[in-house]
């Protein structure tokens, strides 16, 4: 079994979000896929099965659980499929537990399109603020589902960059992954970080799926703006071009192959 390690949302080997991509004829058992993801010990390992020309089924596993949606690993899968399997195709379609996804190759960039979510106000919870370690939260929003990301909006980017969460407290405070965000600096429109200790990932390096909510939120904050230059300010960091089109969100970035393994 061949496994490709790809850094998504970067063209540097030490940045972006690494994902393991496994292309299979048939999906292994869930136990086997979880064992492989645990062994890879990356934020996501994805398994991809061909369903016809340019169409694939994809599943994603953190080191501890299967998840219904992952952006950076889907971008990485599109990069591998375009590079090694479907060289003549510029659009690759995925079916998943989280719904249909599309990756389009645009020169050196790959663009992933999601259906947009329905943003709603959320209560700012003291336990979560305490776990994050900074109570200067301006507001909170979330998606329509109960297991949606929780978005905590801060006043300034330095608050985002300086956060040092207590992950044990954060795990006790909520079962949801938490996005923190603010208006950007250093030429970025907005910045973010993502914490998901409940899924075996204390901090996700770069999170494409987080933009489903953030693109809608920030489009409401910037008058007549729907294209955003975005930084995820994790220790590895990564950059994205995010476009909000009311019923969809596209997230674009570069990918780089880091290594190939035989398991």
Image (cartoon, helix red, strand yellow):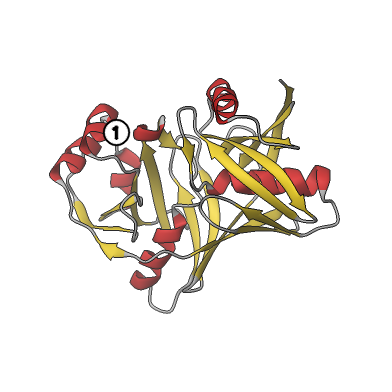
**x and y, in percent, of residue 169 in the image:** 22, 31
Considering depth in this image, is 175 or 254 the residue closer to the camera?
175
Q: How many marks?
A: 1
Left or right: residue 88 compared with residue 45: right
Residue lying at the far left in this picture: please name it.
126
Q: Quadrant of the N terminus?
A: top right
Viewer can see residue 16: no
**x and y, in percent, of residue 121 in the image:** 24, 63
Considering depth in this image, is 215 or 142 the residue closer to the camera?
142
Considering depth in this image, is 4 or 254 the residue closer to the camera?
4
Q: Which residue is drawn at 54% across and 27% down?
A: 34
Viewer can see residue 85: yes
Left or right: residue 149 compared with residue 28: left
**x and y, in percent, of residue 100 in the image:** 58, 59
How many C-alpha atoms fall within 10 Å of the one at disc 1: few (<14), some, or many (≥20)?
few
Residue tagged 1: 164
**x and y, in percent, of residue 240 in the image:** 54, 54
Q: In which quarter of the image is the C terminus?
A: top right
Q: Residue at x 68, y 55 (%)?
A: 109
| Quadrant in the picture for residue 30 | top right
Q: Which residue is drawn at 69% across and 49% down?
A: 78
Left or right: residue 47 compared with residue 149: right
Secondary structure under badge 1? loop
Left or right: residue 213 compared with residue 97: left
């Amino acid at each position: 079994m061949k496994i490709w390690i790809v850094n998504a949302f970067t063209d540097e080997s030490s940045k972006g979000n690494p994902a393991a991509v496994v292309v299979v004829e048939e999906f292994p058992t869930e136990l086997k896929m979880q064992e492989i993801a645990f062994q890879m010990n990356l934020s996501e390992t994805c398994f991809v099965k061909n369903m016809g020309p340019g169409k694939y089924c994809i599943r994603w596993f953190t080191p501890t659980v299967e998840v219904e949606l992952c952006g950076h690993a889907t971008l990485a899968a599109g990069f591998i499929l375009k590079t090694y399997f479907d060289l003549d195709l510029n659009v690759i379609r995925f079916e998943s537990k989280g719904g249909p996804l599309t990756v389009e190759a645009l020169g050196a960039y790959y663009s992933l399109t999601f259906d947009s979510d329905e943003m709603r106000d959320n209560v700012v919870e003291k336990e979560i603020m305490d776990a994050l370690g900074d109570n200067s939260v301006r507001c909170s929003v979330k998606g329509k589902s109960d297991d949606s990301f929780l978005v905590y909006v801060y006043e300034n980017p330095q608050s985002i960059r300086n956060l040092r969460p207590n992950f044990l407290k954060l795990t006790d405070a909520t079962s949801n992954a938490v996005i923190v965000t603010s208006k950007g600096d250093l030429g970025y429109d907005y910045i973010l970080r993502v914490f998901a200790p409940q899924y075996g990932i204390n901090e996700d390096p770069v999170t494409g799926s987080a933009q489903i909510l953030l693109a809608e939120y920030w489009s409401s904050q910037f008058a007549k703006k729907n294209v955003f230059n975005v930084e995820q300010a994790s220790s590895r960091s990564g950059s994205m071009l995010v476009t909000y089109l009311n019923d969809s969100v596209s997230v674009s970035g570069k990918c780089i192959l880091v290594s190939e393994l035989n398991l």
